[in-house]
Image (cartoon, grey):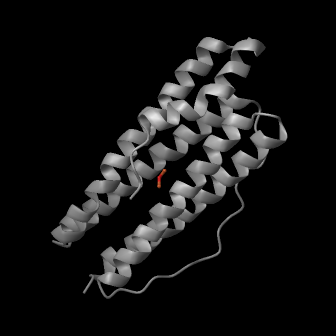
Amino acid sequence: MLKEKVEKALNAQIEKEIYSSHLYLSMASWAESKGFEGVSKWLYAQSDEERVHYLKFIGYVNERGGTTEITAIKKPDAKFKNVLSLFEAVLKHEEFISESINEIQAVCISEKDFSTQNWLQWFVTEQIEEEKSVRNIIDKLKMIGNDGNTLYLFDKDIMSMRTANATPVK
Ligand code: FEO
């Protein structure tokens, strides 16, 4: 049986992971509407990956005899200045998620729920990979600057960068 504080922290994370999926869906749609086909594919795939994350949390809470709460999700941003500022927003969000996972671990330690703390290790590794992948993209976009031809090639290439960096989700 999950302790109340751990269950509450896991439910809060479910909400954040659903928001992550919504945020990347919104970003994907923006990128698609601006003609960035590769960037939109990357973001649609990221949105799907976030769905896998919240399903993992839901499954775990249920498996441990807890109760999940699926709440209303706040509306994500829908407009972005350019592709670089979009990915900077992705990184900021992923850093927030990493911090959130750390906070759940702190709750697990104070509640002596070492099974859940251990289960969260997959997410700790996943967050390191996600942040690394997005920082890599930001570095490339900074090098490209306003060079439209190179940005076009970047858009064509971004999905291969994802395959190289992504951690298998299952
Ligand atoms: Fe599920 Fe990207 O954190």
- Above/below status of 61 relative to 144: below
| Residue 136 x/y as whole percent | 48, 26
Q: Residue at x 59, y 12 (%)?
A: 143
- Above/below status of 64 relative to 55: below
Q: What is the tally of numbered marks visible in this picture?
A: 0
Quadrant containing the C terminus is bottom left
Of 58 and 168, the residue lying toward us = 168
Quadrant containing the N terminus is bottom left
Residue 152 appears in the picture as rendered: yes
- Above/below status of 60 relative to 78: below
| Residue 57 x/y as whole percent | 41, 70
Give the quarter of the image for residue 120. Answer: bottom left
User: In screen coordinates, is 67 left or right of 22?
Assistant: left
Q: Residue at x 51, y 55 (%)?
A: 49
| Residue 118 x/y as whole percent | 20, 62
User: In screen coordinates, is 170 left or right of 107?
Assistant: right
Of 122 and 112, the residue lying toward us = 122
Of 116 and 53, the residue lying toward us = 53
| Residue 81 x/y as whole percent | 77, 32
- Above/below status of 13 relative to 150: below
User: In screen coordinates, is 48 left or right of 2?
Assistant: right
User: In screen coordinates, is 26 left or right of 105?
Assistant: right
Residue 102 appears in the picture as rendered: no
Q: Residue at x 67, y 27 (%)?
A: 156
Q: Residue at x 59, y 49 (%)?
A: 45
